[in-house]
């Protein structure tokens, strides 16, 4: 079980350019499997262009109370990158005028940013239709000061999306650390207690499943059925939807794939499962991702690889939606993760 | 050319068998795909049956494929091992039931 981020371990895979070197080399360079750009060219989608902006995803910092083995952010308690109030202020200015209907806060554990509550209060007054906070669940039970988060989320009508790798203790703790399962169950009960996830409740609680290993997620609907049945029967827990998300070969998941000898097979699986129909709705076509220090990216994955948007406008302080709409989306071989099978996005499958 | 009979990388190349007989290969893979769709049995149940049969026919490619398929479908390791035992019990039973033939032959030949 890892206890430190790649960055704290001074591992070269903490660097985006090193990861890109791997993703562009090996099987792809040798011509064994095609580059992602070639697949897009076959369906006349090169360069990949944005559609209407729908989601503004803001990463408020890489600090997290957990050190999950698969984390593409390489988040953890040792990460000090935290969005300042000044950058949050710049984000608020953008949220006021954006055409996007969804605001999506992520991290790290976003709740660990000292200005998180202030930011949520301010942003919730700006009339965003769907205001998402990605909570890892255990943070709610990590410390007394977080115990009232369910009430806080409710007060601001926040849509909670939480990670839950499996409905069994063993699989969850193996991926996320000892004790994560029990804490997550308690946090889900706390959320249910204030109305989150209950049938017909407007307080949305969705769960994210991502595979705990070098394999792809199965059918989202079937997984949701299994999760609902098990969590209800064993713990009387309710939730709305399950989003099945593919692990992308970035940061700690890439490190795991290489160290376990699964990298080549995994890339083959992704390429084999490539579904041109999923390209139509990949999230980079309707999302802008903002990093803790205000830089703009096509998605959270490109953020972690250090691939800023290919636009004259690259920072939240100079944000211009019209100019950004006119960009080409930056792609590499990790993009196969979003087009495998039924596709994958922060909102689960895309077809 | 690999220097062993089984190479894990060959599994990825399974589809290539169609190159030397396109019609039969295509028919086989269409049939294969159809068999594993949700039907009267769920895709999950079919995956466990496939895993048990993979062990009985001792196909290392199939074992790799259906262990991964089981993981993708959220099947637990306990469920997978029980399926393997079902296969082993049938295989063991198939051997042992021939013991009746042996007993009959023994008795027939003995005074």
Image: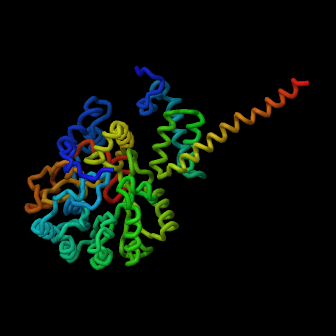
Quadrant housing the C terminus of chain B: top right
Q: Is residue A205 left or right of residue B111?
A: left
Q: Colour scheme in the image?
A: rainbow
- Residues A2 and B21: in front is A2
Q: Residue at x 46, y 31 (%)?
A: B14
Task: Give the residue furthest to the right.
Answer: B111
Residue A281's place in the image compared with A203, above or below, is above
Q: Is residue B21 left or right of residue A215?
A: right
Q: Residue at x 44, y 55 (%)?
A: A170
Picture coordinates of residue A191, whole percent (x, y): 37, 73
Quadrant housing the N terminus of chain B: top left
Q: Is residue A177 visible?
A: yes
Q: Quadrant of residue A295?
A: bottom left
Q: Residue at x 88, y 24 (%)?
A: B110
Residue A337's place in the image compared with A165, above or below, is above
Picture coordinates of residue A48, whole percent (x, y): 23, 47
Picture coordinates of residue A69, whole percent (x, y): 32, 51
Q: Quadrant of residue B85?
A: top right
Picture coordinates of residue A32, whole percent (x, y): 32, 30
Q: Residue at x 28, y 53 (%)?
A: A3
Q: Quadrant of residue A273?
A: top left
Count of number-bearing discs: 0
Q: Is residue A329 visible?
A: no
Residue A295's place in the image compared with B63, above or below, is below
């Amino acid at each position: 079980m890892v206890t430190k981020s790649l960055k704290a371990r001074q591992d070269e895979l903490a660097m985006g350019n090193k990861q890109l070197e791997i993703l562009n080399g090996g099987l792809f360079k040798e011509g064994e499997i095609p580059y992602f750009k070639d697949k897009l060219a076959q369906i006349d989608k090169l360069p990949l262009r944005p559609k209407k902006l729908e989601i503004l995803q803001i990463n408020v910092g890489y600090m997290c109370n957990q050190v999950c083995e698969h984390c593409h952010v390489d988040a953890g308690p040792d990460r000090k990158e935290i969005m300042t109030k000044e950058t949050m202020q710049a984000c608020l200015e953008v949220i006021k005028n954006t055409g996007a209907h969804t605001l999506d806060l992520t991290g790290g554990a976003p709740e660990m940013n000292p200005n998180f509550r202030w930011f949520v209060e301010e942003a919730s007054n700006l009339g965003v239709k769907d205001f998402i906070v990605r909570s890892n669940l255990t943070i709610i039970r990590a410390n007394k000061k977080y115990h009232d988060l369910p009430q806080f989320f409710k007060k601001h009508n926040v849509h909670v999306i939480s990670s839950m790798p499996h409905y069994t203790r063993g699989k969850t703790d193996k991926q996320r650390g000892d004790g994560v399962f029990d804490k997550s169950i308690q946090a889900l009960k706390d959320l249910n207690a204030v109305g989150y996830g209950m049938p017909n409740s407007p307080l949305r609680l969705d769960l994210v499943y991502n595979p705990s290993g070098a394999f792809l997620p199965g059918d989202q609907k079937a997984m949701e059925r299994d999760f609902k049945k098990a969590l209800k029967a064993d713990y009387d827990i309710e939730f709305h939807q399950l989003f099945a998300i593919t692990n992308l070969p970035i940061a700690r998941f890439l490190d795991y794939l290489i160290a376990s000898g699964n990298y080549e097979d995994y890339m083959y699986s992704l390429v084999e499962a490539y579904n041109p129909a999923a390209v139509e709705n990949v999230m980079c076509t309707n999302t802008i991702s903002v990093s803790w220090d205000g830089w703009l990216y096509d998605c959270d994955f490109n953020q972690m690889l250090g691939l800023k948007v290919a636009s004259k406008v690259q920072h939240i302080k100079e944000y211009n939606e019209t100019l950004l709409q006119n960009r080409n989306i930056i792609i590499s071989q990790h993009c196969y993760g979003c087009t495998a099978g039924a596709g994958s996005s922060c909102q689960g499958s895309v077809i | 050319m690999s220097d062993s009979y089984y190479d894990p990388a060959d599994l990825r190349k399974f589809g290539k068998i169609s190159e030397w007989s396109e019609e039969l290969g295509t028919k086989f893979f269409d049939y294969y795909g159809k068999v594993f769709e949700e039907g009267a049995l769920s895709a999950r149940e079919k995956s466990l049956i496939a895993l048990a049969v993979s062990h009985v026919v001792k196909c290392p490619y199939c074992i790799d494929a259906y262990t991964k398929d089981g993981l993708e479908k959220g099947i637990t390791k306990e469920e997978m091992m029980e399926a393997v035992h079902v296969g082993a019990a049938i295989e063991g039973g198939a051997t042992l039931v021939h013991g009746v033939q042996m007993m009959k032959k023994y008795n027939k030949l003995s005074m």
